[in-house]
Amino acid sequence: MATDVEIAQQFTPKAINEISDKLGIATEHVHPYGRDVAKIDLDALSQPSQKQGKLILVSATTPTPSGEGKTTTTIGLGQAFTQLNESVCLALREPSLGPCLGMKGGATGGGYSQIMPGDKINLHFTGDFHAITSANNLLSAAIDNHIYQGNALSIDPRQIVWRRVMDMNDRSLRNIVLGLGGKMQGIPREGGFDITAASEVMAMLCLANNAADLKIRLDRTLIGYTYEGEPVHAKDLNITGAMMALLRDALQPNLVQSFEGTPTFVHGGPFANIAHGCNSVIATRMAMHHADWAITEAGFGFDLGAEKFFDIKCRIADLDPDAVVLVTTVRALKMHGGKDKSDLVDEDLSAVAKGLENLDKHIESVELFNKHPVVALNRFATDTDAEIALIKARCEEHGVSFAETTHHADGGKGAIELAKAVMASVEKSKPYQPLYDLDLTVVEKVRRVSRKMYGATDVAFSKQAEKDLKHVEQLGLTHLPICIAKAPSSLSDDPTLHGRPRDFEVTVSSIQINEGAGFLVVLTGNIMRMPGLPKKPAANDIKLLPSGVIEGLE
Amino acid sequence: MATDVEIAQQFTPKAINEISDKLGIATEHVHPYGRDVAKIDLDALSQPSQKQGKLILVSATTPTPSGEGKTTTTIGLGQAFTQLNESVCLALREPSLGPCLGMKGGATGGGYSQIMPGDKINLHFTGDFHAITSANNLLSAAIDNHIYQGNALSIDPRQIVWRRVMDMNDRSLRNIVLGLGGKMQGIPREGGFDITAASEVMAMLCLANNAADLKIRLDRTLIGYTYEGEPVHAKDLNITGAMMALLRDALQPNLVQSFEGTPTFVHGGPFANIAHGCNSVIATRMAMHHADWAITEAGFGFDLGAEKFFDIKCRIADLDPDAVVLVTTVRALKMHGGKDKSDLVDEDLSAVAKGLENLDKHIESVELFNKHPVVALNRFATDTDAEIALIKARCEEHGVSFAETTHHADGGKGAIELAKAVMASVEKSKPYQPLYDLDLTVVEKVRRVSRKMYGATDVAFSKQAEKDLKHVEQLGLTHLPICIAKAPSSLSDDPTLHGRPRDFEVTVSSIQINEGAGFLVVLTGNIMRMPGLPKKPAANDIKLLPSGVIEGLE
C-alpha cells in the first residue's frame, strides 16, 4: 500500500473558504493561514444557526502502543457522513510537534482517512502550541524575575510548582538547576521543562468558553507558595494580561478539511493523563454550531480520555454526547488475550476470545455514564472473518451495535455502516450521568473512578499524596473534579497488565493542583511530562524536498 | 500627541492582496496569514521583472538608549516615495517577542510612520521566530540524545558550543545545569539558553539565498568537539533535514504594509552585535525584484550594523546599495556632546556642536566604503532651529546632503525632502569597497575594522581570544569575514564613552566560530545573549481588550 504521504499527494485541498462556506461561516469570521487553513473568529458562535449539532464521541478500548486508529476512525466516520450528504464537522486535537520528531510520527489520521495539510498540521500549524509555550514561559520568567528583583511576594524558590515548557522531546531539560552564574544571573533553584502539551495553559485554553473565561483561569493559576506557605497565583504577578495577548489568536479554532472535504476543526492538544485529553471546548462548540453532526474524540482508551471527557469537559462546558463510538481492533484484543505486541498478525481465535474481556469492561464503562456505545471494529488487512465474528457476537450479547470499518483503505465509504449505526443509536440516547458528584471527598472521587472505571478493588494514597490532600483541603479545593494520570496501556495503573485486570489497588503517588484548569491531577505511577528522543528519532528520516514537500512525517 | 496604538487604530490595512498586486506578485505566490499579512513564495523571485531595484541602506549615528528612530525614518522614507508615486518596497527586520515583553516595547516604527498590524508583527507574527527556536532546539535535543544513547561520535559534553534558545527575556536560563535526575534523565552537563534572535539559525536563515543554501549552512554548523578535539558538525547528527522541514515556511519573507500603504517585507531579526543585524537576504532581494526603490536598514549605529551590512551581507549576497542614509538626532548629538541622557530636551548649542564629532566619524565611515551618505535629521518637537542649523552646516562642510524629517508627526509627507535627496544621491553612487579583504589574517581584519570604523589605536587579544584564534587556524577558517560584537552605545568597546572616543584599544575577549552563518564572532566586553526582565516589565502593562485590541504594546 502507498504511504500516508504518497496518498496525501493524490488529494488537493479545496480553498479553505469553500469549507467555511459549507459550514455557513460568514467570510468576515474566516482568517486564512495559507490557502488551506483558517482560524475562525469566536464571533461566529454568536451567529444564528439552524443546525442540530448532535455530538458524537469517539473513544476506544485499551490501545496497543501503536494505537487502534481512533483518530483515523473519527476522520473516516466524518467522511462517511459527508458521503451520505449529511451536514457534518469534525473536532480533533492538534498534534504536538515534539513527538512528531521523536517516536510517533504525525497525527493526522492515515490511509484514505486523513486531514490535510498534514505537513502543516503536524509541524507548526497556526502556531497555537508556540503561543502556549510563550505564555507559559512568560509566567516562568516573571516568577524568577520577581524573586530576582526583590521578591516582594516572598515566593519560596523551593516551592515553585510552575514549570517551563518546550514543544520538543528533550529529556535533558526534565530536571535542571537554573539561575546559575552569580549575582547578575538570577537566583539558583531547581526547575525543569515539560512538553508544551502538558502545560496547564494548554488545559486552560481547551476548557475555556471564551477569552474572559480564559483570563479568569489564568489569574487563579497556582504557581507556588510563599515562605509562609501561602499560595501564590499568576494574578499576583500582574502578567496574565500579557499572557492573554500572547494567546489571543491561539484561542481561535483552526479549520481544515479531510481528504473527502469534511470540515474539521483541529484545536488544542492536552494530554489524556495529566490533562483532560480532548480538543478545545470552543472547537467542539464550533463544530456543533455549524453542522448537524459534530464528531469528536478523547485521547487513549475510554477509561482515560472519555472518563475525563464526561466528568471534566462535559461538566464544565455543559455538553452531552448523543452517541458514543468505541473503536477496537482484532490486534488489540489479541494483545489483551495474552499475545505479545510483536505477534498480533496471525489468526488466533482463542486470544481474541480471551481479549474480549477488555471490550466487555469498556462497554460496561460506557453504560456507567448512561450511554450505549456503537462498537467500531477498525479492520486491518490481516484480520480474519472468524476473528471478527467473535467480536460481533460479543457485541450482540451486550445488546450494543457493531460495525466493521475499512476507512483506512477505503476512506468514508469504509465507514458508512458505522455512520448508519451511529445515526440509529442517537434515537435512544439519554442524558449522561457523571461518575461522581463534585461534593464527594477527593479520596472518594478517586476511589469511585478507580473501582468503576478501572475495576480496582480500592485505592491507596502514598505519604506524599496524603500531604498533597491536606494541601488541597487547606486551599478549599476539594470540590474540583479529578484528572487521574494513569498508564494508558492498561485498565490498571500497572502498564504491563493487559485484558481486564482484577484484584488490584490503584496507588496514588501525588496530587497536583491545577486551579486554573479547574481540576486536581491525581498521579499514579511515573507519568512522563517530558518525553525523550529514541535512539533513532523520527526526525532522522524527515527531509524537505526541493518541491517543498516534506518527506518522512508519518 | 496620540499614542502609537491610538494612531494605529486610525488606519485600516488594505487587503494584503492589494499590496502584493502593487508589487506585481502573482496570486499563486501569495500565502495569506490573516487578511493583512502574507508569506511570499521564493518562486516569485524567478518571475521576470521590469523594476530597477535600487537599494537604499538606512543607518544611523551612535544611538542613545532609546534609539534615534532609524526604523521610523526608514518607514517614513518609504512612505515619502509612495507619496511621490514611486515604485517602492521596504525590507525590515522582525521584532523579537522577548524584548517586546521586557524593556523595549514594539518595533514597528512610531507615530505616523508605522507598519501594521503592529500587534501581530510584535508578537508571534507568522511564527518565524518560533520555527527558528524549534529548529535550534531540535539540534540541541539531538546532541544530548546522541550522548545519552551511547555517544558514537564521542562528543565531549564539556565542549558543546551549541546552546538552546527561547524568544523570551529570561535571565534564569543563561546558565543552567541540565540532564539531572539520574540514569534515565540524560547526561548532566552545563548549558544555557540565548534569546532566539541570537541563534545562529537566525543568522543562517537571514544570509541564505535559498533553501539549498540554508541546508548547506545548517550542515556545516559547528556544534562542539569530540574528546579528541575534533570538530562535530550538525550534519553528523543527521538532523538537518528535519530542521529544514521546520524552517520551510520561515524562509518565505512576510509582506505587510505601512500606514500609507507602502509594501514592506519584514523578515528575519538577527542581532547587530553577535550577528550581522539586518533582515534576510531573501527579503532584500524580494524588495529589489518588485520595486524601483528598495529601502532597508541595519541595526544599531553605522559602525556596527552597516559595517556588517557591507562586509558580511553585501559580500555574501552580492549586493551593493545605491544610497546610504545616516539618521541622526539633536538628542543623540547632545549626548555625544557630554549631556546626560536624562537631560536632552532643552536647547544646548554647545553640546550639539561638541557632539557633531560623532556625526563626523560616521560620515567618514560611510566614505570608507566608497559611499556618500545623505544625513537625515529626525526632528523632535523640542529641537530648535538653531540646533538643527549647526548640524546642517556641518553636513555642508562635509559636502554631504542633509534633510530634516518630520515623518513621526507627518507620515510620508515629512520625509519627502529626504526622499528627493536620496534620489539625487543615487546619481553619484559608486561601487562599494569592503573594509578588508578576506585573505587577511583574523587579527588584521579585527585591527582594520577597529581602527577604521571605531577609531581605535590598536587591538588587544585576551588569552582566551588567542586560544580561539589557534582553533580558527586549525579548522582552516581564517578566510571568514568577522562579526565584531561591541557595545552599541559607543564607537569604542567601552559603552560609557560618547562622542568620538580616541586613544583607546579594542580588547577582544573571545572568538566564536559561526561556521554555518559563515563568520567569526569577535567578542569585545560582555555581550548579552539573553536579556533579563526589568523590575517592571513592559508585559505588566499589556492587556487584551474585549474588542481583541492589544493595549500596551508600544
Image (cartoon, coloured by chain):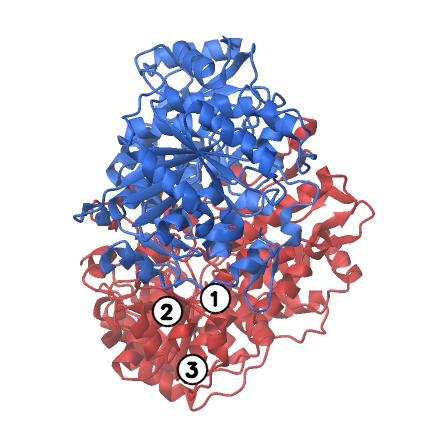
Chain colours: A blue, B red
Q: Which residue corresponds to mark 1?
A: B252
For the residues beneath circles 1 and 2, the answer to whether they share a chain is yes
Question: Looking at the image, which is closer to me, A399 or B533?
Answer: A399
Q: Which residue corresponds to mark 3?
A: B398
Number of numbered tags placed on the structure image: 3
**Residue A70 got which mark?**
none
Q: Is residue B27 left or right of residue A209?
A: right
Alpha carbon distance from label 2 to label 3: 15 Å
* Mark 1 Cα-neighbour bin, 10 Å: few <14, some 14–19, many ≥20: many
Q: Which residue corresponds to mark 2?
A: B328
Looking at the picture, which amino acid does disc 1 mark? Gln
Q: Position of residue A145 (x, y in %)?
A: 43, 35
Residue at point 47%, 60% (across, down): B269
Looking at the picture, which amino acid does disc 2 mark? Thr
Residue at point 66%, 65% (across, down): B216
Alpha carbon distance from label 3 to label 1: 41 Å
Q: Which comes sooner in the sequence, label 1 or label 2?
A: 1
- Viewer-side label of 1, 2: 1
Q: Position of residue B456 (x, y in %)?
A: 58, 65
SS category of the residue bearing label 1: loop
Q: Chain of mark 1?
A: B
Q: Position of residue A330 (x, y in %)?
A: 58, 34
